[in-house]
Image (tube, grey):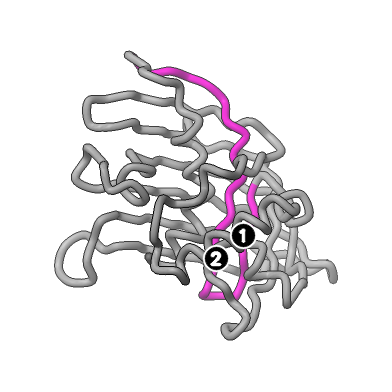
Amino acid sequence: MHRHILSAVLTLLLVVTLVPAAAASPEQTTVPLAFTGPDFTHDLVIFVNTSREAYCDDVQLEFERVVAEWLDGGMEGPFPGDDFPPAVGFVALPVQFVDTAQGVIATTRGNVEGLHMELWVLDDPEDQVGVGACLDTDDADQLFATGTSTFNGYVTDLYGAVFEGEAQRPRFVDHTHGGGVVTTPDGDRYDYSWFYHQHAPCEDGPGPRCEVAKHQLRRLR
């Protein structure tokens, strides 16, 4: 399983696990989603609608350690995420759930604006665990910048497709993007944007790419 799927998509998993049961028609609700993801282009980690201090509590750290052990053990048994409560974001985001015969579709309704965003320096490669934002920033322990971000997300049948192998859809699609202006502790300002798109199952050969990740960091005058 690829690092991006574990680091960026595990947080979106809670959108699916919080879906109302047997929704016969589109249901509007709010979900306190906290989003994190790696930016290997600029050696950063993104925290959206949360802070590293709030997100990386003892429960989240233990969750990432357990996932790392599960991967090292050959992914035997069920994914251990059900034993941990999902991380909670600062703001409850509007989400639409559609329960179809081919699985649940969850979508944030348009661009949600003004969400807290932090960029933290990614650990050196030899110190990266590759399962979450906390263990991959704890050695560097360096804030790069803070600001606000937009957020847009779309996910289909994520849990069944990736972790249970029982998805009703041929593949899951996960798509998130956002961005905004951030300021470093020294006062430098940057325009920052991020984009993740994943398919699963997939192969490295011809066909839908397993994942696409794009990040732009532009210094403002």
Q: CA distance from mark 2 to mark 1?
A: 6 Å
Residue sitting at the far bottom? 126
Residue pointed to by mark 2: 38
> Where does the N terminus fall, quadrant-wise?
bottom left
- Contact between labelled residues 1 and 2, with CB atoms less than 8 Å apart: yes
Q: Residue at x 33, y 42 (%)?
A: 160
Based on the picture, tell me whether residue 40 belongs to the magenta stretch. Answer: yes
Q: Residue at x 74, y 54 (%)?
A: 58
Foreground pick, 162 / 202 = 162
The range drawn in magenta is: 25-48
Residue 115 placement: quadrant: top right
Q: What's the magenta bit mostly, secondary-structure-wise?
A: strand
Residue 135 location, x and y as percent? 65, 67
| Element at label 2 | strand
Query: Looking at the picture, does residue 165 appear above or below residue 46?
Result: above
Based on the picture, tell me whether residue 192 belongs to the magenta stretch. Answer: no
| Element at label 1 | strand
